[in-house]
Image (cartoon, rainbow, N blue to C red):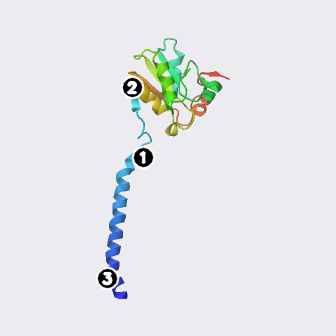
Amino acid sequence: MLGERVRKQPCLQRKMFVMRRRSFLLSCAAMPLALRADASDPWSAQELMQPAELAEKLKGSHAKLHLICVAFPVLYRQRHIAGAALAGPTSKPEGIADLNAALAKLDKNQMLVLYCGCCPMQKCPNIRPAYSAAKNAGFTNVRVLSLPTNFHTDWVAKGYPTDGV
């Protein structure tokens, strides 16, 4: 009996080695995808707008852009970017319908800037569906405001223009 275990053990060790090696190789292959924070983002890097850039555009009286907030109404009422319209959260079908109704009134060739800021952007349930809806509606110049932490930290605390309480 002991002799059988000794003979089978090298085979078992080899199988374990092969399984560990496969696991390691698979994890190495998946590493670039895991390191990309924007792997699930439907927008390109060029479509991501930094807060300072938007604040600068808003200073100019010649700014021809549409600014839509897709955050929850309570957050919008507390404080929002000056001049932004509320479409509401787009994480549910009725929110997408409200956004589509708001988009139907706008020029599809002018710049459209979408933002939420309810939570860290990576976890936001609203910004990705809003972006996709705008693209599906035929908007050609869609930008997403980069608010990696939240609206307060990335916009309000930096002194950029707001309306609300």
- Within 10 Å of the Cα at label 3, are there few (<14), some (14-19), or many (20+) other Cα atoms? few
On the rendered structure, is 86 left or right of 33?
right
Q: Do the residues labelled 3 and 2 touch (CB within 8 Å)?
A: no
Q: Circle 2: is it few (<14), some (14-19), or many (20+) Cα within 10 Å?
A: few
The tag earlier along the polypeptide, 3 or 2, is 3
Q: Which of marks 3 and 1 is in front?
A: 3
**What's the CA distance linking mark 3 and mark 1?**
43 Å
Q: Where is residue 47 in the image (x, y as percent from the top left)?
A: 41, 28
Q: Name the residue under label 2.
A: 136
Q: Can residue 49 be seen in this view?
A: no
Q: Residue 109, how many percent across, how many down?
A: 39, 16
The amino acid on which the numbered mark 2 sits, given as a three-letter code, is Asn
Q: Which residue is drawn at 54% across and 30% down?
A: 89
Task: Write the residue at 53% across / 22% down.
Answer: 55
The x and y percentages for residue 21 are 34, 63
Left or right of 124: which side holds 11? Answer: left
Amino acid identity at mark 1: Leu
Q: Earlier in the sequence, mark 3 or mark 1?
A: 3
Q: In which quarter of the image is the N terminus?
A: bottom left
Check disc 1 and report the residue beneath it: 35
Locate residue 14: give its quadrant: bottom left
Q: Do the residues labelled 3 and 1 touch (CB within 8 Å)?
A: no
Question: Which mark, residue 7?
Answer: 3
Task: Classify 10 Å Cα crowding around label 1: few (below 14), some (14-19), many (20 and above).
Answer: few
Q: Residue furthest front?
A: 94
